Amino acid sequence: MDFDPLVRVLVSVVIITLLGWFAGRLLGIRQSWLRALVASVIGLSAGAVLAFAIAPQNPLPYPVFFLLIILLPSLLTAMGVSALLELLARPGPLVRVESQFAQPPHPIRAIRNWAGRERRYSQITWIAARHGLAAALERGRNTQTIEQPATTSALAHSLRDALAEAGGVFVKLGQVLSTRTDLLPKDVTSELATLQEDVPPAPQKEIESLLTTELDAPPATVFARFETEPVAAASIAQVYRAQLPSGEQVAVKVQRPNIAKLIERDLDILLKLARMLESGTSWGRTYHIMDLANGFAAALREELDFRVEARNLHTAAIALGVSDTVRIPVVYPELSTSRVLVTEWFDGQSIRKAGPLLEEIGAQRIALARELLDALARQIMLSGTFHADPHPGNVFVLRSGQLGLLDFGSVGRIDPLEQAALRDILFAMQRRDVVEMRIALLALAEPTDEMNNEQLERALGRILAQYLAPGAPLQMEMFPNLLRLLQTFGLAFPPEIGAVFRAAVTLEGTLRVLAPNFAIMDEARTLATRWVRESLVPSSLAKSVGDEIQALLPILRRLPRRLDRITEIAERGSLTVKVRLFADTHDEAVITSLSSRAILAFLGAAVGVISVLLLGTSGGPVFAGVITLFQIMGYLGLCASVALIMRVVIAVLRDRQI
């Protein structure tokens, strides 16, 4: 049997694979297999054309012929094609298969999952391209902000339609982005605010099967009565009404079957797109798009675990304390799992539909709105764990005349430092103190090196003078304008603070539905004034002073010994000051990068000059009667010179904001 054709095919495949990989390694870039294959094929084609043109005039033995006439030109061409594809593909390849070698037991399942992700990815990219988002991204690569007045309205409409068509996670993303007035223009947030989920209920047989698995028994044996029609259905879960054998009415929240896999698939795509935006756009780096995407993904993954929501309900109830007006449902932990949550049933209606009920029970809308605002504000400012999505559907008016907060799957958490900064902002606004307000804002957001504090203070002063003048009514648009102002100074807030803004904007809409005449800003000012007074009472001041002294005690205890050592060293004349050059890691990285590129460029030029001299040198051992050792070394040197110089060029171009 003749194996020669098969061997040639295998050798060709190996050469093509190694050529693309080696070209990428020489340039210092990581290529997908498709780009490496394209570079290899084009490179070998160029080498073959060159060999066909040269070989008839200069017949060489096979090894020398293959090395000099085919391999070296092929490698150089493959490097050039790889460099070109790298530049064209910036900010990076849209599709990069990340293999999971840690868990290889199910190759068929892995292939099926990969195919599903790639099919969904192709669907998302096609939707984005069809709605013109790719062109908008290309236009906005070099801008420091997302806003482009000439095209913002059209872009907002296209973005909204694309997210609605993509569905699932992307609709939730649009709903979250609609509240980020600190990042997006008003036209965009207003358009995204119209996104609504339209999700049909999951089949009842699948729900019963899931309940049986989670509760280790059929629903009919666990509950005295279980209504088969859901009272609410969303993209992650749906809620049923049931009755326990003891007689309590409960709400049973059941996760949709297989929804976790679909959400993980979409989150994987979303994180890849965020990574592309941050690496390839100026505004993506300015607003830390990857951090925002990671925060969104973490919050959504929390919603998939109902045990987290059960803990959130317990924490929120403790933070709320004893309240005669606002209630949080009681959890039944013995019946709750990661995919099933059983809570107390609230007999009432959502604020959106509670108009007749409010009239029937004679409730005071203004009083209820004031209590709701106070409850949410205390969650944010005092406990640090707060309801992150208080929209009208999550706030119920109970027949007892109270308000009930539902759906704690999405909560926000801020640490004590962030709480203190938010309180400082409120106090500074109350006192119209521009300096304190700037300090508090910078405690929440990371400023850029180019930011001018004096200019920021002047801009804040104009905002406060416009909206907080004595006797002037407070207006809610002050906060979007303030956030847009901070955006122009390159101040981007972390996701936790974004959750606070999102909850505040959502709460505003809920309060307007509950009490259309409710003066939200005046009530907020009254609330801030009360907190200021509470912080200035003698007991609070004494506690604050005591806390500060307690924190300073270790420093004060060591201070005399340190002063004594400094004076002793000064008397001996051996007092010195150490100054470290390039102590900052960023400066060190910049210097290291510049010096290494300068060395590579110098070596490439030197090797190129030496190679040219070797090609012009006569004498030396002769191979095949036509080529000398010096010429072989010259050709190899030229190849190395080109590789070094192209590597430097690629590194420089990748650093540019293209």
Image (tube, rainbow, N blue to C red):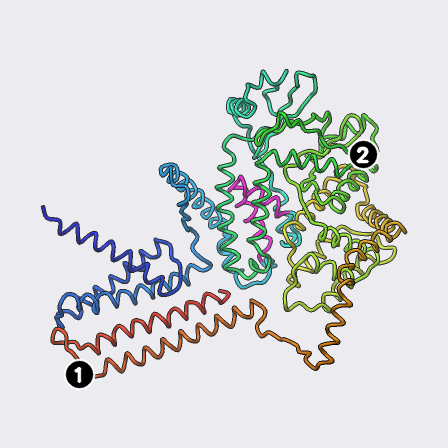
Residue bearing the label numbered 1: 619
At a point 38% along the width and 41% down the height, the residue shown is: 104
Could you tell me the amino acid type at mark 2? Ser
Q: Is the magenta stretch mostly helix, strand or loop?
A: helix
Q: What stretch is highlighted in magenta?
A: 151-178
Closer to us: mark 2 or mark 1?
1
Question: Which quadrant of the figure has residue 644?
Answer: bottom left
Q: How crowded is mark 1: few (under 14 residues within 10 Å), some or many (20 or more)?
A: few
* Position of 268 relative to 636 (above/below): above
Residue occupying the point 84% across, 33% down:
364
Could you say whether the residue bearing mark 1 is in a helix, strand or loop? loop
Please state the horizontal and vertical placement of residue 51, each as a whole percent of the image.
19, 67
Q: Does the magenta stretch include residue 157?
A: yes
Residue 268 position (above or below residue 136) = above
Residue 613, image x and y in percent?
27, 82
Q: Nearer the viewer, residue 522 or 6?
A: 6
> Would residue 347 appear left or right of 78 to someone viewing this image?
right
The kind of residue on which mark 1 rests is Gly
Residue 73 placed where, x, y %? 26, 68
Instruction: Note whether 3 is above or below 632 in the view shown.
Output: above
Q: On the image, numbered disc 2 is attached to which residue?
A: 323
User: Foreground: 114 or 189?
Assistant: 114
